[in-house]
Image: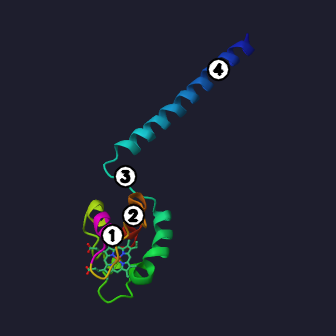
Amino acid sequence: MATQRRQKHGNFTSNNTDLGRWCSFGTLMIALWASPVHSGDIIAGKQLYQTHCEGCHGTQGRPFMPNAPDFSRGEALMQSDTTLLASISAGKNAMPGFRGILKDDQIIDLVSYLRTLF
Ligand code: HEC
């Protein structure tokens, strides 16, 4: 009798946990899907920055190049991700464009990383 009760309880708990797991997974997916900006991956962005941008923009966003904005002071960062994506992909004056070199979502990763520098 006692065993039976424990078994029932056990089944109930395990079902409940499964359901809970699926619910939190669902909620997470909905949260990711519904977030207005699909924010980038900062770790990937940092690696891309070191490869493609650091030569001019410097470590921590303090530029080596005279005309480049200082990201550590938030320069050029008061723009939407979409605007920054467009500038990085098209290039601007002394800065080459990265269209064809980096995918849009890689540039979004970069933008997310740039925002951590300020
Ligand atoms: C050859 C040097 C060079 C490289 C490489 C470079 N930049 Fe730049 N970047 C500049 C210069 C110079 C400016 C300033 C352009 C201007 O406003 O005249 C600039 C401007 C910017 C701006 C501000 C654009 C705006 O709208 O004001 C962003 C954002 C930026 N760079 C991001 C990046 C990222 C991300 C990378 C790497 C994928 C990168 N840059 C690579 C030189 C470079």
Q: Earlier in the sequence, mark 1 or mark 2?
A: 1
**Residue type marked 1:** Ile
Q: Residues within 10 Å of mark 4 (few under 14, many from 20)?
A: few
Q: Earlier in the sequence, mark 2 or mark 4?
A: 4
Marks 4 and 1, how far apart at CA:
55 Å
Distance from the alpha carbon under mark 4 to that under mark 3: 39 Å
Say if mark 4 contacts mark 1, CB within 8 Å.
no
Q: Secondary structure at mark 3?
A: loop
Mark 2 or 4, closer to the camera: 2
Quadrant location of the C terminus in the rendered image: bottom left
Is label 1 within 8 A of ligand 1 (CB to nearest ligand atom)?
A: yes
Label 4 CB, ligand 1: below 8 Å?
A: no
Q: Disc 1 on helix, strand or loop?
A: helix
Q: In the picture, residue 72 is in which quadrant?
A: bottom left
Nearest the eye: 41 or 23: 41
Where does label 1 land, which residue? 88
Cβ(mark 2) to ligand 1 < 8 Å?
Answer: yes
62 up-or-down from 85: above or below: below
Q: Are marks 1 and 2 in contact (CB under 8 Å)?
A: yes
Q: Which mark is residue 107?
A: 2
Alpha carbon of mark 1 to alpha carbon of mark 3: how far?
A: 18 Å
Q: Residues under labels 1 and 2: Cα distance?
A: 7 Å
Q: CA distance from mark 3 to mark 2?
A: 12 Å
Count residues near mark 1 (Cα–Cα under 10 Å), then give few for <14, some for 14-19, many for 20+.
many
Looking at the rendered structure, which numbered label has been put on residue 38? 3
Above or below: residue 50 compared with residue 16: below
> Between disc 4 and disc 1, whose residue precedes?
4
> What's the amino acid at mark 2?
Ile
Looking at the rendering, the stretch of residues picked out in magenta corresponds to 85-92
Q: Are marks 4 and 3 in contact (CB under 8 Å)?
A: no
